[in-house]
Image: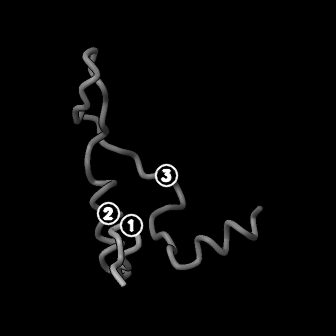
Amino acid sequence: MKVSASEKQINWYEMDQAWNRFWSKNRLDIDENGKVYRTNIPRIKPKGLNDPEWKNFKKRRELDG
């Protein structure tokens, strides 16, 4: 059975690297022509999201609500 890209499993280390890479980049914006570009403004990581617990995210969401 072939697995699509959206169903591919990744390990904790890869997810942690991607998470930190996302927050280390600057924000995106859209110019007057609708073109997306990267600004000089850094992204601000929300409080409480320094070490996400990806494994239990779905379970927590179900419990919260």
Q: Amino acid at mark 3?
A: Pro
Residue 18 placed where, x, y %?
30, 65
Return the mark for residue 29: none
User: Which residue is labeled 3 in the image?
Assistant: 46
User: Which residue is labeled 2 in the image?
Assistant: 20
Q: Residues within 10 Å of mark 3 (few under 14, many from 20)?
A: few
The number of callouts visible is: 3
First of labels 2, 3 by sequence position: 2
First of labels 1, 2 by sequence position: 1
Residue 62 placed where, x, y %?
72, 69
Element type at marker 1?
A: helix
Residue 25 placed where, x, y %?
26, 49
Q: Vertically, is 28 above or below 6?
A: above
Q: Vertically, is 11 above or below 48?
A: below
Judge from the rendering whether residue 61 lies leftward or rightward of residue 44; answer left or right: right
**Closer to the camera: disc 1 or disc 2?**
1
